[in-house]
Amino acid sequence: MSLEEIRQEAEAFLEELVEEEYKNRAGLKTKAGLSVIYEKYPRLASQSLFFELEGMAREGQGEEGKGIGFLKEFIAQNTLDSEVREITDRIFTWEATQLLEGEGRALSFRSAEVEIKNQGLRPMREAIEEARCQALREINPLLADYWKRVHEGALRLGFGNYTRMCQEHSGVKLFPLRDMVDGLLKGTQDVYGDLLRWFLKRELGVKLDQAQRHDLVYLFRAKGYDRVFLPTALVNGAERCLKRMRLDPEAGGRLSWDLEPRETKAARAFAASIRVPERIILVVRPGGGYDDYLAFFHELGHGLHYGYTDPDLPLEFRRLGDPSVAEVHAFTLEGLVRERGWLRYFLDFPDSKDFLRLAYLHKLYLVRRYAAKLHYELILHDGGSLEEKRGVYREVLTRATMAEYPEELYLYDVDPYFYTGRYLRAWLFEAQLKRYLYEHFDEEWFRNDRTGPFLKGLWRDGQRYTLEELASNLGLEELSIDPLIQEIGQYLG
Ligand SMILES: [Zn+2]
């Protein structure tokens, strides 16, 4: 296949695939039909094409060579994803249809986490968590099969193991990254423990040494602030802010917003990039509250990034490449919800000191959780028996978050292809970019009409540049944990 043929076929394939995922996760269709789409495009999931691209990548120079590298990564992942396509369909369908029994009424699996977030009564939360774990015990053998086959697929592509495959393609050195974020875990251990102890006691009446995962989920839902984060103010606040920065909330008609509540809609908001940049859908299950605002702005960041991507870039720079870059744009918009000035100006919330401590504790929880996940996932994919990884998951996640994590999540709470590392890198970079925004566009950069054109300039490049290239283009320093620790420390110290 020529490069042009690969691009065209991959474009058509991704459009169908994302559309199908969108329908399933948006609750428009419960039976997932991804397999059929993979079967329509067998060439994109063939080892021979992968090896062909390997040859091309060796000869490719400069930007073209980089693009071929991105295509090669895509074909490798697609080959693996295609091998487990039927399992993925079964898992997706299961997620969309599985009901949990409890309190005399059936609760959908996808609604369970939302229910936990909103459940102030601890025994009730515990019961839902237990029902969710029970359901996971049933699906775990299927998930184990999924991971076994993915690991074998990496070997067939000529890599010593899955981790090495991911590392080589992404260029992200996972072990040094793990060591770097280890420093973050150590450096924030005390402040995290002290504040978590204090908030758990005040908000939930729960002692730190008895904290469970579901307690943290409920705590960081920050229900006490619902009067600030009204469902009705969300869309309006976002639109006003974007217009203030001279940004079109619909990215010239390419980004549409699906805000309709549906029971089978996934709890987590998402941006479906069906065609980049022409057809992007922002899917949110609205309910109001801090937590919904975060998810909404995160996905809005993704949506705007895709919607403003230069349509003339080749596929590999529009849709493939370093997803850390996409996460940076999402985190930047998500960060609005943790900006004192934004809260005051767009939500009429002047006295946000106490809230911001909780919000930054939440951010620290997330970063620590992902640092632990990276640790765990490196062990999960080390070639040893999967069965033995249950206990490791519970131990590593519990230690970092200081709340008991159920081991049943050990195969479900895993991001494919070490996406966990992409998030971590994005958090580190976001803290640097935020400083840049403060310096160049003022502390209230979100009210500055020069910010929009600057962001559009970044979004235009899609994922053409890696984080390292982006940092050097903007004159930022190498990735390190210091700016993030300082940012969090400002609010928690
Ligand atoms: Zn994201």
Image: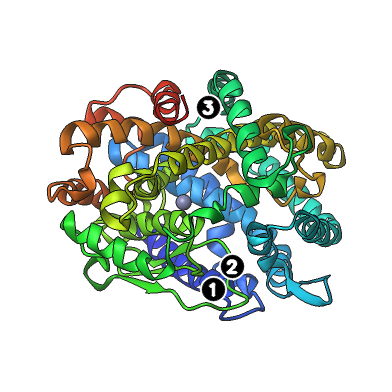
Q: Is residue 127 above or below residue 279?
A: above
Three-letter amino acid code of the residue under disc 2: Ala
**Which mark is drawn over residue 266?**
2
Q: Mark 1 or mark 3, which has the lower sequence index?
A: 1
* Mark 2 burial class by Cα count in 10 Å: few <14, some 14-19, many 20+: many
The CA distance from mark 1 to mark 3 is 35 Å
Measuring from the top left, give residue 56's x and y in whole percent: 42, 42
Question: Residue 299: image x %, image y %?
Answer: 42, 58
- Residue at 42% x, 53% y is 298
Disc 3 residue type (three-letter): Lys
Q: Secondary structure at mark 3?
A: loop
Could you tell me if the residues under marks 1 and 3 are in contact, i.e. CB atoms within 8 Å?
no
Read off the residue under disc 3.
Answer: 173
Quarter of the image holding residue 339? Answer: top left
Dot 1 alpha-carbon crowd within 10 angstroms: few under 14, some 14 to 19, many 20 or more: many
Instruction: Give residue 330's position: percent from left, percent from top.
Output: 39, 50
Q: Which mark is residue 26?
A: 1
Compare marks 1 and 2 and give the one earlier in the sequence.
1
Tell me which residue sits at (56%, 29%) in the image. Answer: 174
Q: Label 1 sits on what residue type? A: Ala
Q: Circles 1 and 2: CB distance less than 8 Å?
A: yes
As displayed, is residue 402 above or below residue 70?
A: above
Looking at the image, residue 402 sits to the left or right of residue 229; the answer is right
Looking at the image, is mark 3 or mark 2 earlier in the sequence?
A: 3
Is the CB of mark 3 within 8 Å of ligand 1?
no
Determine the CA span between mark 3 and mark 2: 32 Å
Query: Which quadrant would residue 266 be assigned to in this image?
Result: bottom right
